[in-house]
Image (cartoon, rainbow, N blue to C red):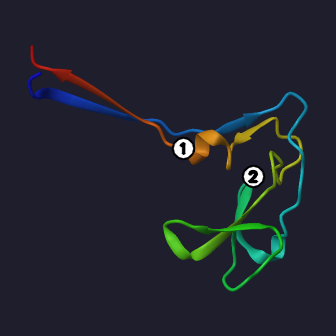
Amino acid sequence: MGEALFIISIVTYHGWLWVPNKLAEVSITKNIVKKKFARCAILKDNFDTAELKAPWHWYENVSFVMAPGIAGDRAGDYYNHGSLSLQECLMPVINVRKDEG
């Protein structure tokens, strides 16, 4: 087998939720967050909470809270970005390679 002529890397990333009867609604505590999204929120500095909390990988001094399960902070959503779905937690990389000869 010869050396590779070229290698193409395909990185996929996407997680989403769609339910026919609307996502469950939960309320993320508003007075402890800097910015809210549909299924998570960035915490204000030095706030602690009993809600599902995690550090942000890229900025260790930033934490965020998440809606539990497949719930969201907005009423009436049928579709939303997945947050902790399998597609969000894994990033498959596909390498395509063509060898000489």
Name the residue tied to disc 1. 90
Task: Give above or below for 23 relative to 21.
Answer: below
Give the number of the mark in front: 1 or 2: 1
**Quadrant into which the N terminus falls:** top left
Estimate the x, y position of residue 54 in percent, counting from the top left: 66, 67
**Percent coordinates x, y for residue 53 in the rendering:** 72, 68
Rendered view: 23 above or below 55: above
50 displayed left or right of 100: right
- Camera-nearest residue between 33 and 15: 15
Q: Dot 2: within a 10 Å radius of its alpha carbon, few (fewer than 14), some, or many (20 or more) residues?
A: some
The image's mark for residue 38 is: 2
Q: Which mark is residue 37?
A: none
Residue at the top extreme of this rendering: 101
Task: Give SS at disc 1.
Answer: loop
Residue 12: x and y in percent read: 47, 36
Q: As displayed, is residue 30 above or below residue 24?
A: below
Front residue of 72/69: it is 69
Q: Residue furthest front?
A: 1
Judge from the rendering whether residue 16 lies leftward or rightward of residue 50; answer left or right. left
